Image: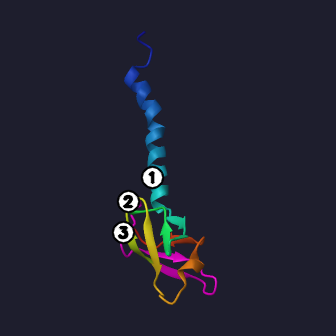
Amino acid sequence: VISRPKRHAILAEMRAPISDYISEFASELLCRPLRTTLNYVDGELTIPLGTHHGIGLNSLAVANGTDTPWQILRVSAASLMAATLAPLNNRREAAGLSGQSIEFMELK
């Protein structure tokens, strides 16, 4: 009985690798850019991400354009789990961006 390890020592050995894993996992998530796909619904470009994900009004996103290498969009409205985007170039047809992948440039 005396030579057996104590319960707190066993638990400490079991928990040691978990804290390193959680730290690495959290730093990897923080470094990933936020990406999603544009949907054209009722005349507006919408995405299934919102303020819960860090997106706010006037946040900027980049989409790969068909006639240009890229297209910049801004968030014109945001709710908890959805947002509406508009191209910065107002001559750009919003329906033509439907289905394209976008990536947000900065989040708060």
| Disc 3, SS | loop
Q: Which residues are magenta?
A: 53-73
The disc placed on residue 26 is 1
Magenta run includes residue 27: no
Magenta run includes residue 57: yes
The disc placed on residue 56 is 3
Gap in Å between the C-alphas at discs 3 and 1?
22 Å
Which residue lies under the disc numbered 2?
A: 80
- Which amino acid, mark 2? Leu
Gap in Å between the C-alphas at discs 2 and 3?
10 Å
User: Mark 2, mark 1: which one is toward the viewer?
Assistant: 2
- The residue lying toward the viewer, choosing from 8 and 41, is 41
Q: In the picture, residue 11 is in which quadrant?
A: top left
On-image quarter of the N terminus = top left
- Regarding residue 64, the answer to whether it shows in the image is no
| Disc 2, SS | loop
On-image quarter of the C terminus = bottom left
Q: Provide residue 77's location: percent of width, then percent of height.
A: 38, 71
Upstream in sequence: badge 3 or badge 1: 1
Q: Provide residue 31's location: percent of width, then percent of height.
A: 47, 62
- Which amino acid, mark 3? Gly
The answer to whether residue 14 is above or below residue 61 is: above
* Count of numbered circles on the image: 3
Q: Provide residue 37's location: percent of width, then percent of height.
A: 56, 67
Q: Provide residue 81's location: percent of width, then percent of height.
A: 42, 59
- The residue lying toward the viewer, choosing from 95 and 70, is 95
- Regarding residue 55, the answer to whether it shows in the image is yes
- The residue lying toward the viewer, choosing from 84 and 52, is 84
Upstream in sequence: badge 2 or badge 3: 3
